[in-house]
Amino acid sequence: MAAPMTNDHSCVFALALGVSFLKCLLINAYYSTDFDVHRNWLALTHSLPISQWYYEATSEWTLDYPPLFAWFEYGLSHIAKLFDKEMLVVQNLNYSSPATVLFQRLSVIVADVVLFYAVKECCKCLREDKGKDILGKPSFILAVLLLWNFGLLIVDHIHFQYNGFLFGVLLLSIARHFQGRHLEGALLFSILLNLKHIYLYIAPAYGIFLLRCFCFTQNNADGSLQWRSFSLLRLVALGTIVLSTFAVSFGPFIALGQLPQVLSRLFPFKRGLCHAYWAPNIWTLYNIADKALSILGVKFKLLDNNKLPKASMTGGLVQEFQHSVLPSVSPLATLVCTLLSILPALFRIWHRPNGARGFLRCLVVCALGSFMFGWHVHEKAILIAILPLSLLAVENREDARIFLILSTTGHYSLFPLFFTTQELPIKIFLMMLFTIFSFTSLKNLFRKGGALVNSLEALYILGLIPLELTCEFVYPMTVWQKTYPFLPLMLTSVYCALGVTYAFIKLYILLLTCSNNTNKIKTQ
């Protein structure tokens, strides 16, 4: 039994080494304003007392991550000074010396070690056929889907962020729940929430699962909850872990009387419904419906063009705006819609948990529901659904089908983030590489039963090709480019929103209809 496990670990190591080499080749690639965001955070955590961290506003890129991430930046800053001390000066706005670029790029690459370990642990959790060729094993396919994920590569190692490190913590937490080590899983997720609060999207799945499957220790014969099995000791242990983590993270700021200031930075509701680039969610479809109705209203003289709101929803600005015809959407409305979208999934795992795999499917639904209906959603948040879904995709045919649609659509929706000419061939090549591997490997894994996607789904996915050709090559040569520069972005968001919405519906149907004893679909 040791030899196959050793081979699996060797493959993960080889894949990690290969992708690390690719990341090194991208060190001098284009980077976004997020590069200076993190440089500024290095500077302020290194140069200022903790009492000023969440008040400092010399740069427009103020600290808006939870305290544990601030301490992470503080730790990095002590290594950064060995590369270039000038990057740690708060007043050095937009500072990007070669040494600074090298350090920040390397910090992301090295932090991905957490992801490598988490992927290795996730691969141990899969149910596999013995004696199968290593390249056709679900564990190998999963390792590639996670370590070579197209979205992580371009967002972290071109655009610039630390998502690989953060997703490593998330995947390791999921793996611990699969292994029955629930307190470790809860601790890791608590740490993750205090590193980046966007993972609140999936907190309801964690809360319900741990209460149902950890604090209650037994089920009735029909699978329903046995109320008398509730363990107060387990609830206290769980609560102690969670509260202790938050106390360590937020405690110093509570002692300084700065909690309201910290929370105002973490939850800036005045940024508007949509991000600078429309995330492909339900509000994209809502926005375009409002635009279409306003145009028709003006054309048929039902609306006065001079009285319509002038704020552009597609100008690349982060701002509040009013819809022209449809009711404007408030943060409270998005919260209600989000809760309504995930409640059936939460009820499902409470009523029929279906183990760690049921929890994981609920987690993906919560991530996607929050993406679909949340306030000021970033397009990069689609990765919170895509990466965990990879674990289900290598074990279940229907999950594989949904994964192919969601990952292809969601990854393509990230293209507008990379608008420079020199990155165009890189993003196209890496996207094609990942997509081709995803389709061929999962098709071979589930070769019985025909094609994974039907003809209409395949036609929709292939439609991304003419869309890309139009947006990148055809439209810039037309007379409309100067008048309607936002149109390619709008087309991309709307087209991708259709695919993401479809995947969300399919995933929900699968969650609500899957058997309580779902078995792995045979792959041979």
Image: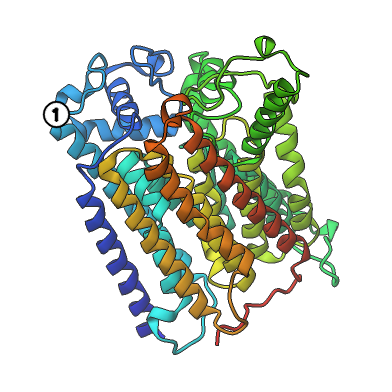
Give me the residue at 70% from left, 74% from top.
Answer: 518
Question: Secondary structure beneath disc 1?
Answer: loop
In screen coordinates, is 26 left or right of 210? left
Specify whether residue 353 is in view: no
Vertical order, 448 against 168 (above or below): below
Give me the residue at 53% from left, 31% from top.
Answer: 247
Question: How many numbered marks are there?
Answer: 1
Using the rendered view, name the quadrant where residue 279 is placed. Answer: top right
Specify whether residue 360 is in view: yes
Tell me where residue 232 appears, x and y as whole percent.
Answer: 73, 49
Quarter of the image that includes the N terminus: bottom left
- Which sits in the foreground, 398 or 343? 398
- Which sits in the foreground, 480 or 462? 480
Tell me where residue 187 appears, x and y as whole percent.
Answer: 53, 47
Tell me where residue 424 appears, x and y as whole percent.
Answer: 31, 46
Tell me where residue 59 appears, x and y as whole percent.
Answer: 34, 16
Vertical order, 130 against 466 (above or below): below
- Which sits in the foreground, 278 or 34? 278
Give me the residue at 34% from left, 72% from top.
Answer: 9
In screen coordinates, is 229 left or right of 95? right
Q: Amino acid at mark 1?
A: Asp
Quarter of the image that includes the C terminus: bottom right
Vertical order, 337 against 270 (above or below): below
Using the rendered view, name the quadrant where residue 306 is placed. Answer: top right
Dot 1 corresponds to which residue? 84
Indicate how the structure is coloured in the image: rainbow
